Image (cartoon, helix red, strand yellow):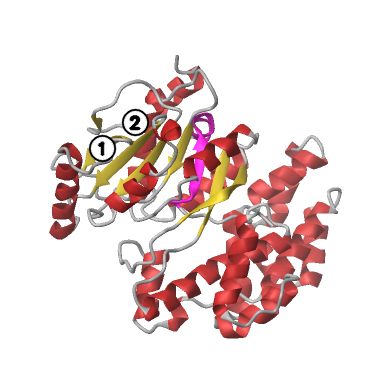
Amino acid sequence: MIPKEITKYLSSRAVKGPWEICGRFQGTFAGAVVIPALAESKNLLATLRSLAQNPPELVSRFLVLVVINNREDTPQTDKDDNRSTLELLAGDGPSLTRLRLAWVDAASPGKELPAKKGGVGLARKIGFDLALPLLDFKGPAPLLVALDADTLVQPDYLSALTGHFRSTAAGGAVLAFHHQEGATPQERQAIRRYELFLRVYVLGLSRAGSPYAFHTIGSAMACTAAAYAGMGGMNTRLAAEDFYFLQHLKKTFGIESVTGTHVLPSARASHRVPFGTGRSISRLLAGEESAVLFYQHECFAILGTWLELVATHFDASGQDIAHQAERISPELKKYLDQAGFVEAWEKLRKNSRDQAALLCAFHSWFDGLRTLKLIHHLSDTRYQRKSPEEVLVPFLHWAGLERLDDPDAQLSLLRSIQSTGS
C-alpha cells in the first residue's frame, strides 16, 4: 500500500503530461534508477551494462528507468538519435535481461518536453514521479537514484547504496565520483582541471565548516522516496537542477555521503547547457583557460571565520554581528548588506525556540547558493580567481594537506579524502 504522504505528493505535485512507463516488468521495486537520455544512443548501453554487473539479487529489485527526452525545438540529429534509442529499447535490443528495464518516451511528437521548461530537471522529475507508485513500501525505505546516460557505475554500486540507507537517518545521499579519462591528452588535461576545480571548491567549504560541503552532481545523488515526496520532488530547471535539488534535500531531510563505490561521469565536451562539465570542457579544449579559474583559499578562510562568528553569537543583534563581520572583511560586510542579513537574522531569532533551532535556521538562510555568491563576491572584488598552478599548492597547505605540485597527484589526493568523507 502506498503511504498517504506519497499519495498526497502524487495527487498534488507530480508531473502532469502524456508520459507513461513502457517495458516488460511486473511487481514492485526496492528502488528505481532514473536515467535521462538526450541523444545518448552511443553511450546508454555501456551505462546499462555497468548496472547489469551489480549483484543479481539487487539488480532484480531495482527498476532501471530511461527517460528518452527532447523538446520540439531540439536539433533533428538529436531527435533521430532518440528515435534510435527508443527502437533499441522497444525491440529485443540489448542483451540486458538481468535488468528490470523500462523507459519513458518523452521524445516522440506529442510527447516532447515543453519548450520553456523542457530540460534535464523535468526529465528527471518525470522518471522519479512515474516510478513512485511502483515502489515497495512494505520493507526498507525504497530509494530513488539519479544517474546519467553517459555515466558508468561499479559492480558494488547498488550494494553501497542500499547499505548506506540502512545505516543512516538522512533522507538524501551523494556518491563519490571520478570522471572518465578523456580520449586525447588535451581532453585528459581539461577534465583533470575541471575536476580539480570542483574538488577544491568542496575542500574549501569543508575546511570552512559549511554544511553544504558536498558535490552537486546529477549522476551521483540519491534519496528515499519519502524524502523525495516530502521535499516536494525534483525541480524542472534546464540546468543546475542537481544543485538546487540537493540544497533543498539538505535543508529538509539531510544529506550524507555514500562510501565504498563511485560513479564515473563522462569527460566529453557539450554545449547543451550554459555551464557545467560539458560546456567547461568545450571551452578548455578551445584554448579558453579562463573558463576554469580557481578560487583562492582566502575566500574560504573568510567564510569559515564568518560561520564561526555566527555560531558563537546567538544572542547578538544582526547589527552587532554585521559590525564584527566588517572586521573579518569589508567585502564580507558589503555582501551581507546586499543579502539583507540584518533583517533576516532578526526574523530568525524571533522565530527560533532555542540556539540549535536558530543555527539550523541560519544555515537554511545562508545556504549553498548564498555561500557560492559570497565566494563569487570575494573573488570578484578582492581575491581574484587564478590558474591552478598559482592557487593549488597554497590552498592545500591552508587546508592542512600535503603541498603537492603535480596535478595528477593533487587530484588523486582529493579523490581519496573526498571518497571517504574526510
Task: Give the camera-side residue of 81 and 234.
Answer: 81
Q: Amino acid at mark 2?
A: Leu
- Residue receiving disc 1: 104
Residue 83 placement (x, y as % from top left): 15, 48
Residue 79 placement (x, y as % from top left): 16, 53
| Number of callouts | 2
In the picture, measured across the screen, residue 291 lies left or right of residue 19, that is right
- Residue receiving disc 2: 130
Local SS, label 1? strand
Residue lying farthest to the top in this orientation: 1
Location of the C terminus by quadrant is bottom right
Q: Is residue 240 magenta?
A: no
Q: Is residue 374 above or below residue 231?
A: below
Q: Is residue 229 magenta?
A: yes
Location of the N terminus by quadrant is top left
Residue 53 placement (x, y as % from top left): 39, 44
Query: Which residue is located at x 63 percent, y 69 percent?
Result: 413
Q: Is residue 395 above or below residue 95?
A: below
Q: Closer to the N terminus: mark 2 or mark 1?
A: 1
* Label annotation for residue 358: none
| Chain part drawn in magenta | 218-231
In the picture, measured across the screen, residue 107 lies left or right of residue 295, that is left
Q: CA distance from mark 2 to mark 1?
A: 9 Å
Query: Which residue is located at x 63 percent, y 53 percent?
Result: 212
Query: Which residue is located at x 50 percent, y 68 percent?
Result: 195
The answer to whether the residue labelled 2 contacts the one labelled 1, judged by CB atoms less than 8 Å apart, is: yes
Q: Amino acid at mark 1?
A: Val
Residue 40 appears in the rendering: yes
Local SS, label 2? helix
The part of the image, by quadrant, that contains residue 306 is bottom right
Task: Give the camera-side residue of 84 and 377.
Answer: 84
